[in-house]
Image (cartoon, rainbow, N blue to C red):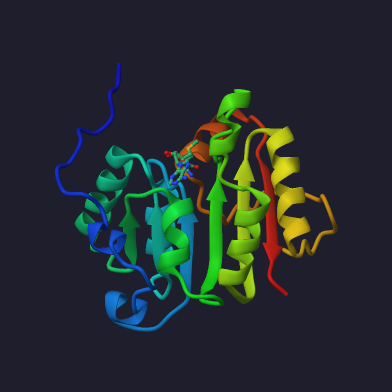
Amino acid sequence: MTRGPLLRPEPAGAEFLTLLTPPDWGTIFGGAGPLELELGSGAGAFALGYAARHPAVRYVAIEWRKKYARELEHRARARGLTNLRVVEADARAVIPRLFAPGSLSAIHLQFPDPWWKRAHRKRAILTPAFATLLLGLAAQGAAFDLRTDVRSRAEEMLATLEAAGWHNPLGPGRFHPADPDDVPSSRERRYLETGEPVYRARLVKR
Ligand SMILES: C[S@@+](CC[C@H](N)C(=O)[O-])C[C@H]1O[C@@H](n2cnc3c(N)ncnc32)[C@H](O)[C@@H]1O
């Protein structure tokens, strides 16, 4: 049985948690460049692969499970990925304080927990209000990269994003075909191996 990594003692991104207003990301990353956000990075394969492939991108991954967040930060450091920061927090709570309106060039939300039980639905990350908030934090032309394996949730989330004003270049309710050049997330790797369906959407802020 695999237990995954042990819990590393150092919290990931603790310096960001007490901020009341967005930090100067230029100072934090040591330069300018597109600022991209990942919500719920999990085991972090996408964050690591994407940040390595796009060194000009300044990438912030938010993950509330300590084990995952700390392990991802450790791996980013070990690989010398200076363009990746991890924040161990509830994304819904910290995002309004971390990012200024119009500052994000892309938002990645991949395989968010489906929260099947009715009593747990309130934990679902993509509410109408959150989709609107994210649109406000996005720059003109910013991309929203959504992926999930659950068709009903994919349809709901796509409808929520479109209703909030995210534009779907393929037409309302249309999913995006698989792109062989995409970096797969940890969860996605499994489905690519088993051939199970993945629903993707790529929306933009017009
Ligand atoms: C099913 S996993 C997918 C992880 C990763 N995106 C992937 O595709 O492999 C969903 C992740 O989102 C995280 N998560 C859920 N709600 C969150 C929230 N409000 N803030 C931060 N992380 C959250 C969970 O802890 C979990 O690691």
Question: Residue 22 or 30: which is nearer the viewer?
Answer: 22
Q: Residue at x 29, y 81 (%)?
A: 27
Would residue 49 be seen by someone viewing this image from the given angle?
no
Q: How many marks?
A: 0
Q: x, y percentage for residue 182?
A: 56, 54
Position of residue 82 measured from the top left corner of the image (x, y, whole percent): 27, 68
**Which residue is outermost to the top?**
1
Q: Give the x, y percent position of residue 50.
A: 44, 59
Q: Is residue 33 left or right of residue 108?
A: left
Q: Nearer the viewer, residue 5 or 66?
A: 66
Figure quadrant of residue 65: top left
Work out whether 177 lies above or below 186. below
Q: Is residue 83 above or below residue 38?
A: below
Q: Nearer the viewer, residue 24 or 141?
A: 24
Residue 131: image quadrant is bottom right
Q: Residue at x 58, y 25 (%)?
A: 119
